[in-house]
């Protein structure tokens, strides 16, 4: 039997829960040969201390061998990311997900990332999110019904006809938002390739609807020479987005009113403080930060670019970094022995609480169940949504970095 057919034959899917076009499988997908036993309960793990999980995670990982890979986003905590086979930002991880041949992808990240991995996965691969409550506040700010209403309003204004407008969504969005863009000639971008995606879109249309992060959209467009006066913000809770029709017609970029609750906490006064108290220190921020912060920074970049910048800097360099605190702390530890100093831009430390939900207990529970033949917390995107989301993601992979 062909390898792929063999893998397909190994699984028997039990019923799942359909939510917003997604099939969330809390109920385990059971390997036939293990169907007689039951998945172990997460509650038994949650009462155990973190450090007691290490040996169990390592043992389950070893038992699974090449059947499973663990993908870890840079914002994951140390106790979890140390077990990742691949670490990276969402672009790097989505490429790794598309290229792996493992049967199971355990995604230590948030919901939209696991969905993306499922969209890019082969039919015989399964994606697991160790905690289904690990969402993303930014992704939740653009719901499909709201986006469809916005598009209808733009249609009524005559903005969507011909090559009028291209919808472009940040990776940090639900699969159905990605599909919405794919179906309407648009694409997905990450913070690494937002500019390339904007250039791709402007080569085909005069206007972009950018979802869901207004800050990444504004920072990208501004860096391309588009003045703020040619951008408008669409508020899904206002009639017609709260924007007058003549302003919508004149705009080159329509920014969805969404943001990252972590990066939005960095403020211009944080940059001022560093300038005052740490002369010579470079300020590097993620483009999900507000425009005012980005304007004051020395450099902007995705997490991968921030790491690269610090890596290439000469000994004695120092950086105040505006991104999630787990990554900043890890960079501080990694580069201190090389004579480079890394601090957080905001002393109160900006933590992504949803990323933090993936604990060693969740990872151990997931892996031990897998190694016992039970797939728990599988993320599965509806086939129709998957098709168009894939179109939008393929366009992104074509655009490249
Ligand atoms: S850091 Fe912000 S954008 Fe990233 S997962 Fe957390 S809430 Fe979402």
Image (spheres, rainbow, N blue to C red):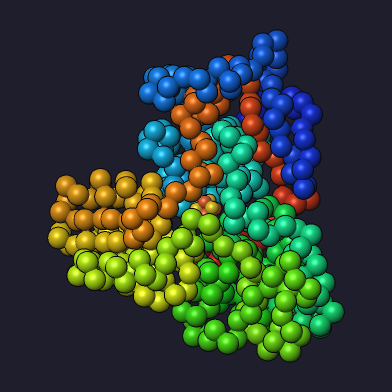
Image quadrant where one finds the N terminus: top right
Note whether 185 is above or below 316 in the view shown.
Answer: below
The picture places residue 276, in percent across and down from the top left corner, at: 24, 71
Note whether 59 is above or below 204 in the view shown.
Answer: above
- Residue at the outermost top position: 36
Give the residue drawn at x 14%, y 60%: 316
The picture places residue 172, in percent across and down from the top left corner, at: 58, 56
Determine if residue 56 is in view. Answer: yes
The picture places residue 300, in percent across and down from the top left corner, at: 39, 68
Note whether 189 is above or below 329 in the view shown.
Answer: below
Give the residue drawn at x 57%, y 62%: 259
84 relative to 215 in the view: left or right: left
Specify the quadrant of the image occupied by residue 207: bottom right
Instruction: Count up the numbered dots.
Output: 0
Give the residue drawn at x 56%, y 71%: 217
204 relative to 356 in the view: left or right: right
Specify the quadrant of the image occupied by residue 103: top right
18 relative to 177 in the view: left or right: right
Q: Nearer the viewer, residue 193 or 236?
A: 236
Determine if residue 396 is in view. Answer: no
Give the residue drawn at x 53%, y 29%: 362
The picture places residue 324, in percent across and down from the top left corner, at: 42, 52
Note whether 80 is above or below 137 in the view shown.
Answer: above
């Amino acid at each position: 039997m062909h390898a792929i057919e063999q893998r397909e034959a190994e699984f028997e899917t039990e019923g799942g829960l359909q939510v917003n076009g997604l099939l969330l499988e809390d109920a385990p997908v059971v390997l036939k040969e293990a169907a007689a036993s039951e998945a172990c309960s997460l509650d038994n793990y949650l009462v155990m201390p973190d450090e007691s999980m290490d040996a169990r995670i390592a043992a389950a990982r070893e038992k699974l061998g090449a059947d499973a890979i663990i993908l870890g986003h840079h914002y994951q905590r140390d106790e979890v990311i140390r077990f990742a086979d691949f670490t990276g930002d969402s672009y790097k991880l989505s490429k790794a997900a598309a290229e792996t041949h493992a049967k199971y992808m355990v995604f230590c990240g948030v919901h939209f990332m696991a969905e993306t991995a499922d969209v890019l996965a082969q039919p015989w691969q399964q994606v697991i999110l160790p905690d289904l409550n690990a969402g993303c506040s930014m992704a939740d700010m653009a719901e499909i019904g709201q986006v469809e209403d916005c598009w209808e309003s733009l249609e009524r204004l005559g903005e969507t006809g011909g090559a009028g407008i291209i919808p472009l969504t940040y990776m940090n969005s639900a699969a159905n938002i990605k599909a919405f863009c794919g179906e309407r000639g648009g694409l997905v971008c990450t913070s690494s390739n937002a500019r390339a995606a904007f250039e791709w879109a402007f080569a085909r249309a005069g206007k972009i609807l950018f979802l869901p992060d207004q800050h990444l959209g504004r920072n990208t467009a501004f860096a391309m020479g588009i003045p703020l006066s040619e951008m408008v913000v669409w508020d899904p809770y206002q009639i017609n987005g709260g924007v007058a029709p003549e302003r919508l017609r004149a705009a080159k970029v329509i920014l969805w009113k969404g943001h990252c609750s972590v990066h939005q906490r960095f403020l211009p006064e944080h940059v001022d403080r560093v300038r005052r108290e740490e002369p010579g220190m470079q300020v590097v921020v993620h483009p999900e930060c507000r425009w005012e912060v980005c304007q004051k920074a020395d450099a902007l970049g995705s997490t991968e670019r921030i790491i690269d910048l610090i890596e290439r800097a000469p000994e004695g360099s120092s950086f105040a970094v505006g991104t999630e605190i787990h990554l900043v702390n890890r960079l501080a530890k990694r580069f201190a022995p090389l004579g480079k100093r890394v601090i957080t831009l905001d002393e109160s430390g900006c933590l992504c609480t949803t990323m933090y939900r993936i604990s060693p207990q969740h990872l151990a529970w997931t892996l031990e169940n897998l190694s016992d033949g039970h797939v728990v917390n599988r993320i599965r995107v509806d086939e129709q949504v998957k098709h168009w989301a894939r179109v939008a993601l393929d366009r992104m992979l074509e655009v490249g970095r």
